[in-house]
Amino acid sequence: MSAGSPRLSRRAAEYAFLVFCWLATGLALVALAAILWALFKQGVGGLNLAVFTRSTPAPGSEGGLLNAILGSVMMCVVAMAGAVAVGVMAGTWLAEFAKDSAYGKVVRFVNDVLLSAPSILVGLFVYELLVRPMKGFSGYAGAAALALLAIPVIVRTTEDVLRLQPVALREASVALGAPVWKTILAVVWKAAQGGMLTGALLAFARISGETAPLLFTALNNQFLSLDLGKPTANLPVVIFQYALSAYDDWRRLAWAGAMLIAVAVLAVTIIARLSTREPKRS
Amino acid sequence: MSAETDQVETAPARTAKGVVFDRTFEALCFAAATLLLTALGGLIVSLAIGGWPAFRTFGLRFFYTSTWDPVQEVYGASGAIVGTLITSALALAFALPFALGVAIFLVELCPERLRRPIGTAVELLAGIPSIVYGMWGLFVFAPWFAKHVQMPAMMASPPGSVWEKLTAGVPNGANILSASLILAIMILPFIAATMRELLLTIPPAVRESAYGLGSTTFEVIRKVSIPYVRSGAVGAIMLGLGRALGETMAVTFIIGNAHGFPSSLFASGATIASTIANEFAEATGELHTASLVALGLVLFIITFAVLALARLLIGRQAHS
């Protein structure tokens, strides 16, 4: 052990290892910077008032992304409403009622599978479930697909934050004579609302950029429409179609749309992250 | 009996109305949980039913032939299956060492002040939508890749060698290798985040005792930390792999979308997900649609196997 060379090789290995770790992190940051830089460079050029006030154009004519933005917002709102209701209830069941029962374990496993199931398969499922029987693409089908993607995220975070709430909290409420449902609603949920909100925000961030499941559920719509019963324009699918088109003005719109989505998603992610750090740890 | 609900159930003051509400509330929660099961069951059943015409027409040939011809109505999935497996495996091979490096950097090396901003930045990398990766990949990364990687590699390969076969292709940057690299960037933050969590679970005393014996950081990581979190780490890798297998939009943009077996690293190819994304909305024949749904079922089975394995490995560590 006291020989000079093994020591030197140990030190060399250590040095190479440290350099590699720095390098890996540096590369990850460079990738992030390169993507954001390209987004802003290309996106800002395509951004103007028309993007927000006019609908998607035919190639060569003036237009914007209004119908796509509106369609995306409508579908996300509908999807989130359904997903929060189902996800919070299911998460509550797992945390408060299931405990370590066999069925609880099955549900937890299934939720994990849904959480990482490829989103395009959810699109196929909703196509078979809703689009094919109803003989038409619709905004509701798109919202259903997005809801299915949001639910597992909400279930997971709800269960996690509810489990963090101390047993004494529930005991205190019950000791005052409150029934279980009231204890959960007014005490446990209330104490956990910050964490649950974070879960919902993360779910929202996840679905707002999803493209694959919308390709054959909501499809697209060239015109401004408030009717979710028909094919509905949405930002991701418009970006997909316009980016791969041969027209420069369509590509410019695609970049502007991509920047809008990325900014929205990253902003929501950052807000969710900041809000989880908020509670003071005693 | 220390579980909370046991005590709740023996609570003193209970009105009949309270009991009814309690039952209803629990039933609602139970129904929501059961809906998850129904969703997964429905997913599997609908893919099986929707894909059935393809399985019936082609039988096992669907899995091992690579002809994909909507005009002749002949469909074989092996090109897409192989494309999916190759791109995912390559992506994992590229992402894993770097993800480990990032995780170790954040846990061991990072100056305290930079820990949070760098952690957030890595997390943002995970938050960027797939379609944005796709656009960046096609318009920014692919041209750079063609010029600085693909061309030099093709120039440098001796004629007639294996190397030449591996690098054959049109130098436009849309190919198997560049798709794998984009996938690697996409799954890196997920693996890094999970690894970081795992490394943080190691009790300080374990690492300190190794340092106390005179180990270098490298030795502590290699001989103490990594073995300590091994099964969880394998689980994390599997989760990353699962993500790569199902990734759709980014791959669709950059893989070149050619059917059949990819003949080289720089050849265009297709994955299961990219094929579905490209063709489903425009599929005309019944058999075309069914074949795409059948592809979906294959993808589900592959990802499910990977996820179940990951779950098993992560779960095992939680128990020990």
Image (cartoon, rainbow, N blue to C red):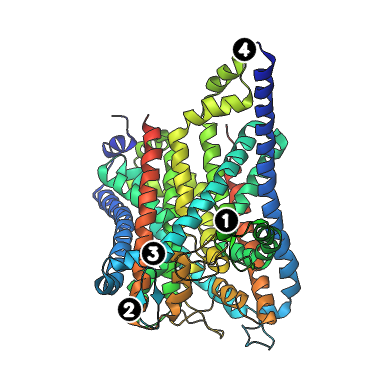
The answer to whether dots 1 and 2 both sit on one chain is yes
Q: Is B311 placed above or below B30 here?
A: above
Q: Position of residue B197 (x, y in %)?
A: 53, 37
Q: Look at 35% across and 51% down and name the residue there.
A: B305
Q: Which residue is mark 3?
A: B78
SS at mark 4?
Answer: loop
Number of on-image labels = 4
Q: Is residue A119 left or right of residue A104?
A: right
Q: CA distance from mark 4 to mark 3?
A: 55 Å
Question: Mark number for residue B161?
Answer: 1
The numbered mark at residue B71 is none
Q: Are marks 2 and 4 in contact (CB under 8 Å)?
A: no
Q: Amino acid at mark 4?
A: Met
Residue B17 sits above or below residue B12 on the image: below
Label 4: which residue? A1
Q: Identify the mark at residue B287; answer none if there is no mark.
A: 2
Q: Chain ID for label 2?
A: B
Q: Earlier in the sequence, mark 1 or mark 3?
A: 3
How many other residues sit within 10 Å of disc 1, few (<14), some (14-19) or many (≥20)?
A: few
